[in-house]
Image (cartoon, rainbow, N blue to C red):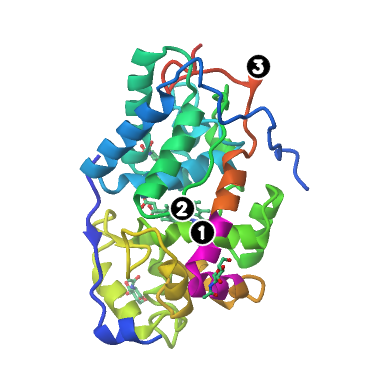
Amino acid sequence: MASPLLLLLTLSAALFLSPTVHSQRQRSSYLTTAYYRRSCPRFEQIVQDTTTNKQISSPTTAAASLRLFFHDCFVGGCDASVLISSTRFSKAERDADINLSLPGDGFDVVVRAKTALELNCPGVVSCADILAVATRNLVVMMGGPFYTVKLGRKDSLTSRSADVEGNLPKTTMSMNQHIEIFKSKGFSVQEMVALTGAHTIGFSHCKEFSSILYNYSRTQESDPAYYSEFAKSLRNACADYKKNPTLSVFNDVITPNKFDNVYYNNVRKGLGLLKSDHDLSSDWRTKDYVDLYSRNQSEFFRAFVKAMEKMSEFGVKTGRQGEVRRRCDAFNN
Ligand code: HEM
Ligand SMILES: *[C@@H]1O[C@H](CO)[C@@H](O)[C@H](O)[C@H]1NC(C)=O
Ligand SMILES: *[C@@H]1O[C@H](CO)[C@@H](O)[C@H](O)[C@H]1NC(C)=O
Ligand SMILES: CC(=O)N[C@H]1CO[C@H](CO)[C@@H](O)[C@@H]1O
């Protein structure tokens, strides 16, 4: 897959200075940290080595993996259903429109770890566990907080693109809709704001925010909620996006490659990239959390750790609810 053109916007120095629930919900008590201790003692080390090598050779991997994991978990649980390839007979989750560009690196890091693990302890480690641990390791590599990932997930027996709709947030949705999606999976508004702090790394394609840049309204070219110089540089960076759909911009324009709380600072100053990012700083239900996390990175990390541990266990399959796939992109049968 051709790597998308990354554009780091150069901002003026002034900018730097200025200031229940649902039935899917099941946190399994079956998961344990020691799950592979006997059956695959080198599990942690092998995943660690694979993620480190992959991230060093392809620095976009961390964000790719984090988004991929989110999309896996929110559609029917963290069960590697997003890794299944479509066949002639069935269109899989990963080919739903919204995946548009789940970058190949996220898939690749899991495949590499799986290949190494199959040599060491064949048929033992699930793809769902690999994705969960790889994501955690990559977050840490980017400077983010360590959190515990319990193990013992099984891989799903289904993956249908039709199941994606309604389970993942889109930037065009209202805050009510965003809150509703997270709530339907047992996540509070506070947890939603903390998880979305994931936008401290990675990038978005121009088409995801073009509607607020061009022809915004009859009187305004861009959404006035954006810092005007920022909107201007985005308009330049994306000018050619219709001809070149790979054009993309860092989610956190100030510290794009560091997992930190600067994302929340940006959002408060009109430097958030997506409309959904901006809305977090204006909606009364979310803005206090944005303020808190922008003031205090420890508070953000603490909340992110708790929310990621929860998300990592969302809707997991254990025992006979799933299988350990031999290949992550195909069911065993
Ligand atoms: C209201 C909630 C959210 C919305 C509307 C949203 C939407 C988006 C969109 C449109 C992109 C750009 C995709 C592209 O152009 O390739 C993106 C990127 C990303 N999202 Fe979210 N997202 C949300 C929450 C989350 C959460 C909860 C996580 C993880 C815990 C997450 C992780 C990421 C990451 C890491 C990227 C960068 C991907 C990369 O660089 O490859 N997002 N998001
Ligand atoms: C904005 O609107 C004008 C007039 O309707 C149109 O010609 C132009 O292509 C639009 N620009 C973009 C970037 O969509
Ligand atoms: C930030 O939050 C941490 C953890 O909750 C707390 O211990 C610390 O005092 C806070 N720092 C500031 C400057 O408020
Ligand atoms: C990485 C990946 O599988 N992306 C797919 C997402 O969906 C589009 C459109 O359906 C496919 O073309 C991509 O291959």
Q: Which mark is residue 320?
A: 3
Residue at 55 percent across and 52 percent down: it is 305
Furthest toward the right, the residue is 20
Residue type at tag 1:
Phe
Whether residue 296 is situated above or below residue 119 in the rendered picture: below
Magenta residues?
289-304
Give the labeled residue for mark 1: 301
Report whether residue 246 is seen.
Answer: yes
Quote the CA–CA distance across marks 3 and 1.
35 Å
Q: How many marks?
A: 3
Whether residue 37 is situated above or below residue 92 in the rendered picture: above
Residue type at tag 3:
Arg
Does label 1 or label 2 sit earlier along the sequence? 2
State the SS at label 3: helix
Give the labeled residue for mark 2: 145
Report whether residue 91 is seen.
Answer: no
Mark 1 crowd level (few <14, some 14–19, many ≥20, 10 Å Cα): many
Residue at 61 percent across and 38 percent down: it is 313
Mark 3 crowd level (few <14, some 14–19, many ≥20, 10 Å Cα): few
| Ligand 4 - quadrant of the structure image | top left
Does label 3 or label 1 sit earlier along the sequence? 1
Q: Quadrant of residue 109?
A: top left
Residue at 58 percent across and 58 percent down: it is 303
- Residue 201 relative to residue 299: left or right: left
Does label 3 or label 2 sit earlier along the sequence? 2
Q: Quadrant of residue 130?
A: top left
Taking depth in this image into account, of 222 and 16 the one nearest to the observer is: 16
Q: Which percent across, then down, holds residue 82?
A: 48, 34
Circles 3 and 2: CB atoms closer than 8 Å: no
Circles 1 and 2: CB atoms closer than 8 Å: yes
Q: Is residue 132 magenta?
A: no
